[in-house]
Image: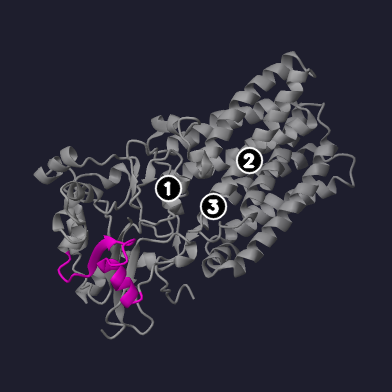
Amino acid sequence: MRWGMVIDLSKCMRCHGCVAACRVEHFLPLGVTWPRLIAWEEIAGEETTYPVRCNQCKEAPCVKVCPTGATQQREDGIVWVDQDKCIGCRYCIIACPYQNRTFLSKDKDTGYFPGYELTDFEKAGKRLYPHTTGTTEKCNFCMERIDAGLAKGLKPGVDREATPACVNTCPSRALTFGDLDDPDSEVRQLIRDFKGFQLHPEYDTDPSIYYIDKGWRGV
Amino acid sequence: MVLRQWMVTHEWMVEPTPQTEWIMRRGILVWIAEVFTSLGAGLYLISLFYNNLWGMAAAWLIIMFLKVPLHLIYFGRPLRFWRTLIPITDSWKTSWFTRGINFTVYFGSIVFIQILVTYFFPGTGWDIALRVLGGVFAFLVGIYSGFITSYCKSIPFWNTALIPLILLFAGVTDGFALMLAVGMADASVGIMAVEFGSRILLTVNIILMAVFLWNATYTSRTAKYSAMLLLKGSLASLFWVGVIAVGLIIPLAISVSSIFADEASAPLLISAIVLHTIGAVTLKYVLLKSGVHNPILPAITSAYH
C-alpha cells in the first residue's frame, strides 16, 4: 500500500480551499502553509496554476539526510516529521528538491493577531495539534485522519472521514487520493488514462503526487 | 487583475531560488562555522605534518570552541544535539550530517588526549597511534561539509564530487596560512618549508576552482546560473576580489616571491596570512550564497534564460 494523490490541473480553479482546509485541520501557525499554489506564467502569456505540497517521495531525500531520524517514512509511504526528535538543522529543507518544507521559527508563530490574545481557534490548536518552534514541518497527507479512518474500516480516498482534508474540501474535485499500489484504484486509473506525471522525475525520488491535465488531453 | 496579483505570491518557486537557510539571518552562523571547520581541520593536518604541538592545540581550540558552538547555536533545538550521536541514532547510514557531527566529536575527544600524550610522552607508541587517529578524523572533519552539500540534488551547483575536494584543499591551504602564523612565533617551524607547501596548495586550489566552475557551466541550467552569479552576477565582485585575488593570487604571488629571497619578510608573511584568511571567509560565503534550488516547475522565466 502506498498512498498517493492525483491533481488535475484543468480542474483547479485557484480557490485556495485546500490551503485553508489544511490550515484548519492542522491548526497551522500564521507563517506556515503546507499546501501551496504556484502561479506560473506560461510562455504564451496564459497563466496556469500548480497546487503543490510535500510530494511524499518514495525515495525521500529528506529522510536520508535527517541526522536524528526525525523525518521518517511509514510503510504506507507517508513521510512525516517527529517534532520531538527534530533538532532544527534544516538540512531537509536544503535537500528537498521541491522546497516543500518549512522551518517553524518564532517569528512564524506570532499568533494570528500579533500583540493580542490568542483566538479560541489558536488556543484549541495549542492543545490539540501543537507545533514546536525550532523544528521543521511539512504536509503529512493527514495521516491522523487516514489512521483513524482505517481503524474504523473506512477507505481513504473513498470515505471522507479517512481522506485528507484538502481532498475533501476541493470544490472542483481537482484532487484525488488513493492507493498507488492498487492497479484498480481511481488514482492509478487517472494516471494511466491521462498520462500522469511527477515533478522532477530526474531526481529519482518517485513522488507520490501526480499531475494530470484533462483539459490538455481534450477530455 | 486582482486575482493575478494575489496569485504571484509563490512565483519565486518557478524561478531558480537561492537557498537561504544556511546563509541568511541565523544561517550566517553556518557560514562562520564552516570557516572555522576549514581553518581548524586544515591547521591540525598541517601541524601534524610539521610536528607542531602548538598548531595542533590551536586547531583543537578552533574546532571545539568556535566551530561546534556556532553550529549548536544555529540549531533550532540545540539541546537535542545528543540525538545525533551514535549509537542513539542510526542515521549515520545515510546522513552525512550525522557522520560529520560524530566525526567532530571523535576528533575532539581523540585530539584532546593526543595533545596531552604528545606533551607528556612524546614519541611513544600511544603518541603515534593517537596522531594517526587524530589525522584521520581531522581529514574527515575537513571533508564532511563537502559531502553534505554535494549530496543535495536539489542544488545542482553543489551536487558535484568536486565540492568535497574544494573544501578539503581549501582547508589544508588555510592550515598552511595559519601554520605560517604559528611559525612566526615558534622558531622550530621551517617557514620556507611551509611556504613551499603553501605554493603547491594555492596552485591546486586555483585549478580546482577553475575546473569546478567550468564543470558547472554545462552540468545543468541552474548550475550554470549559480556559476554565472559568481563570474558575472551579484557575487562577482566578492568572488573575483575576495576569493581569487585576495585569497589565492596575492598569497601565491607573495609565496612565489619568497623563492627569490632567503625568507619572506614578516610584513609580507602577515599580509599573506591575513589575505588568505579573508579569502577563506569569502569562499565559504560565495559557495553558500550561490547555492540555488532548481525551480519546482519546469517553467522558466525570461530572467532565467
* Residue assigned mark 1: A63
Q: Quadrant of residue B237?
A: bottom right
Query: Which three-letter amino acid code belongs to the residue tagged 2?
Result: Gly
Lateral position of residue A188 relative to residue B147, left or right: left
What chain does badge 2 belong to?
A: B
Residue A206, percent from left and from top: 42, 61
Q: Residues within 10 Å of mark 1 (few under 14, many from 20)?
A: many
Residue A191: say if magenta.
Answer: yes
* Residue assigned mark 2: B142
Rounded to the nearest whole Å, what is the CA distance between mark 2 and mark 1? 24 Å
Q: Nearer the viewer, residue A19 or A73?
A: A73
Query: Which three-letter amino acid code belongs to the residue tagged 1?
Result: Val
Rounded to the nearest whole Å, what is the CA distance between mark 3 and mark 1? 13 Å
Q: Quadrant of residue A10?
A: bottom left
Boundaries of the magenta span: A170-195
Ranked by sequence position, the earlier of labels 3 and 2 is: 2
Residue B225, percent from left and from top: 53, 67
Q: Residues within 10 Å of mark 3 (few under 14, many from 20)?
A: many
* Mark linked to residue B151: 3
Labels 2 and 1 in the same subunit: no
Q: Quadrant of residue B79?
A: top left
Lateral position of residue A29 relative to residue B250, left or right: left
Can you see residue B188? yes
Question: Please, what secondary structure does the residue beneath circle 2 have?
Answer: helix
Which of labels 2 and 1 is toward the front? 1
* Mark linked to residue A37: none
